[in-house]
Amino acid sequence: MSDGFAWRAGGCHCGGVRFEAALPAQVEAQACNCSMCAKTGFVHIIVPESRFRLTAGADRLAEYTFNTRVAKHLFCAECGVKSFYRPRSNPDGWSVNARCLDTVEGLEIRIEAFDGQNWEANAAGLAHLSKEPA
């Protein structure tokens, strides 16, 4: 992919679910303190729809929703790992778990704290992350 983006592969623990995300050399990531992220250790790299592709394991994905049922938490039915999901804050994109990338070599990840415990007050601050760069 051009424009300074490179496809980076990742997946779940057992390898049954695989994905790729086109990321720049520097990415902004969020460490969220909501009940879901705090319990799973998910570190968000949110990308537009066009910069994400599922490469294997669609048939292995199970879905979990709660509260408003807008976010689609997808996880491998075999090993239970959630390597990406469709976030409520960015329904036009995907949130990839930085911890599920195969390698972060050559990738500078700036992890910022995100107050997901007060999601309604803070979610709009994430909207830009799933937009295509100008």
Image (cartoon, rainbow, N blue to C red):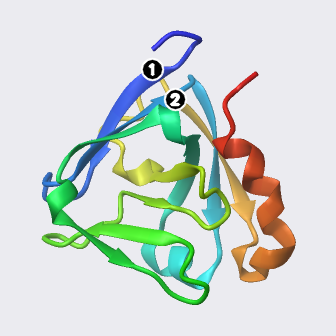
Viewer-side residue, 45 vs 65? 65
Q: Report the front residue among 38 and 91.
A: 91
Circle number at residue 6: 1
Q: Residue at x 36, y 67 (%)?
A: 74
SS for dot 1: strand
Residue farthest bottom in this picture: 67
Q: Horizontal and vertical percent for residue 102? A: 30, 39
The label shown at residue 84 is none
Disc tally is 2
Q: Crowding near pointer 2: few (<14 within 10 Å), some, many (20+)?
A: some
Quadrant of the snapshot with the N terminus? top left
Which of the pair 121/100 is nearer the observer? 121
| Residue at (45% x, 20% y) in the render | 6
Q: Which residue is located at x 72 percent, y 61 percent?
A: 113
Q: Nearer the viewer, residue 7 or 29?
A: 7
Describe residue 72's horizontal placement relative to residue 117 as left or right. Answer: left
Q: Position of residue 97 (x, y in %)?
A: 45, 54
Amino acid type at mark 1:
Ala
Which residue is at 52% across, 80% downward?
36
Label 1 crowd (10 A; few <14 / some 14-19 / many >=20): some
Height in image: 131 above or below 43?
Answer: above
- Tell me how far mark 2 sits from mark 1, CA to CA: 5 Å
Indicate the quadrant containing the C terminus: top left, top right, bottom left or bottom right. top right
Q: Amino acid at mark 2?
A: Leu
Label 2, secondary structure: give it. strand
Q: Which residue is mark 2?
A: 23
- Of the numbered discs 2 and 1, the one sitting upstream in the chain is 1
In the displayed structure image, the side of residue 51 where residue 11 appears, left or right: left
Q: Position of residue 29 (x, y in %)?
A: 62, 48
Residue 38's place in the image compared with 52, above or below, is: below
